[in-house]
Amino acid sequence: MTETTSKTRKIQVEIEETLRRVVTVEVPDTPNSDNMAIAEASKKYREEEIVLDSGDYVCTSFNIVNDKTKTE
């Protein structure tokens, strides 16, 4: 009778979730309005006036980042 051995591998899997929300900010109408809008949204996000949650969920991806058994 042949004996089977159980081999195991340690593989690191990256789990990445994407959250997305479109917000409206009000800025002066200048040639720099786009940059000002991004800065304003970023400020509101950093100060936690905008908090993304499960309702903003878009997708999840799974990726192998390191297989400890592969030879390099």
Image (tube, rainbow, N blue to C red):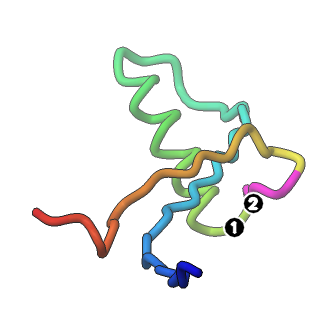
* Callout 2: SS: loop
Do tag 1 and tag 2 residues touch (Cβ < 8 Å)?
A: yes
Closer-to-camera residue (34/66): 66
Q: Is residue 53 magenta?
A: yes
Predominant secondary structure in magenta? Answer: loop
Closer-to-camera residue (65/41): 65
| Residue to which mark 1 is pinned | 48
* Callout 1: SS: loop
Q: Position of residue 62 (x, y in %)?
A: 57, 51
Q: Which residue occupies 54% across, 57% down?
A: 43
Q: Is residue 67 above or below residue 45?
A: below
Q: Which residue occupies 69% across, 67% down?
A: 48
Q: CA distance from mark 1 to mark 2?
A: 6 Å
Q: Is residue 15 above or below residue 24?
A: below
Residue numbers of the magenta segment: 50-54
Which quadrant holds residue 52? bottom right
Q: Position of residue 5 (x, y in %)?
A: 51, 84
Q: Counting other residues with Cα less than 10 Å from the Cα at mark 2, is it few (<14), some (14-19), or many (20 or more)?
A: few
Q: Quadrant of the C terminus?
A: bottom left
Q: Position of residue 69 (x, y in %)?
A: 29, 72
**Which mark, residue 51?**
2
Q: Is residue 7 magenta?
A: no
Q: Is residue 3 left or right of residue 69?
A: right
Q: Position of residue 7 (x, y in %)?
A: 47, 80
